[in-house]
Image (tube, rainbow, N blue to C red):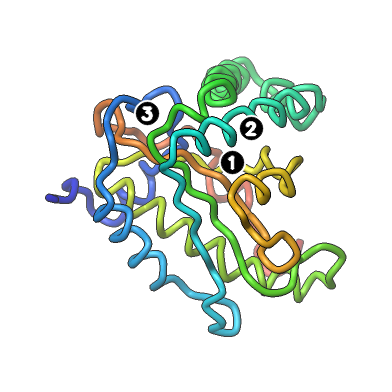
Amino acid sequence: MTLLPLNPDQLLTTTRAVRKRLDFSRPVEEHLIRECVDIAMQSPSGSNSMSMQFVIVRDAQKRKALGDLYRDCYAIYSQMDGTYIRSIDKGDATGNAQQQRSADSADFLGEHMGDAPVLVLACNTGARTDNLPGMVAASLAANIVPAMWSFMLAARARGLGTAWTTVHLFMEQQAADILGIPFDTVQQFSLSPLAYTKGTEFRPAARPPAESIIHWDTW
């Protein structure tokens, strides 16, 4: 497949969380998924342990089960004032309008996660991060988080859309049971739909200037 004509900066700034523009009717070819995973394996990993794992869900019944679980978890999330995307005040009318559009999109995925032709769970093997010291937890997360981001960038370059979500982790054990994931030794970090996008043009999102988050030499 020909890659989209994106330079590195364009790829990095237009890989959006895609929800409403996912094409649920079009199957995703297996070789493209393999290519994305191959690229993900080239990401940096904590202690070079290469403990990242990807569970690729194409089975219709399992996708439906995960979609139902995600919908139930999303109902919990939507009641969390200050955490739920729609309840966050951005401080100005323009920011709040953008926030509500994002919330509409997130709500849509809350209802339709199971409709995506492919679901991708990013996992890490070994010790779980529950109750571990911060250094150890961060090191373990450093195996899968960069890998999943590389997967998402590779997907974007191939005309595919993704969206990093963590809502299903309210019921991580139940998700593990659906997919046969050994809960005690494999930790799930995110769940993403994977589908072709309706159109391939995406713009950079409105973000604060870099200076607003940089601390030079001291906080």
The reply to whether dot 2 and dot 1 touch (C-beta < 8 Å) is: yes
Location of the C terminus by quadrant is: bottom right
Task: Kindly identify which numbered label has been placed on residue 22.
Answer: 3
State whether residue 94 appears in this view: no
Is residue 160 left or right of 128 when viewed as pictured?
Answer: left
Q: Nearer the viewer, residue 49 or 25?
A: 25
Task: Single out the residue that lies furthest toward the left.
Answer: 2
Q: Secondary structure at mark 1?
A: loop
Which residue lies under the disc numbered 2?
Answer: 70
Mark 3 crowd level (few <14, some 14–19, many ≥20, 10 Å Cα): many
Q: Amino acid at mark 3?
A: Leu
Q: Is residue 8 above or below residue 44?
A: above
Place of residue 39 in the rendered image (x, y in percent of width and height, measured from the top left)? 34, 65
Q: Amino acid at mark 2?
A: Tyr
Which residue lies under the disc numbered 1?
Answer: 165
Residue in the image at 72% along x and 43% along y: 174
Q: Is residue 112 above or below residue 38?
A: above
State whether residue 169 appears in this view: yes
Place of residue 137 in the rendered image (x, y in percent of width and height, measured from the top left)? 74, 69
Place of residue 158 in the rendered image (x, y in percent of width and height, measured from the top left)? 24, 47
Residue in the image at 64% along x and 66% along y: 141
Q: Secondary structure at mark 2?
A: helix
- Quote the CA–CA distance across marks 2 and 1: 10 Å
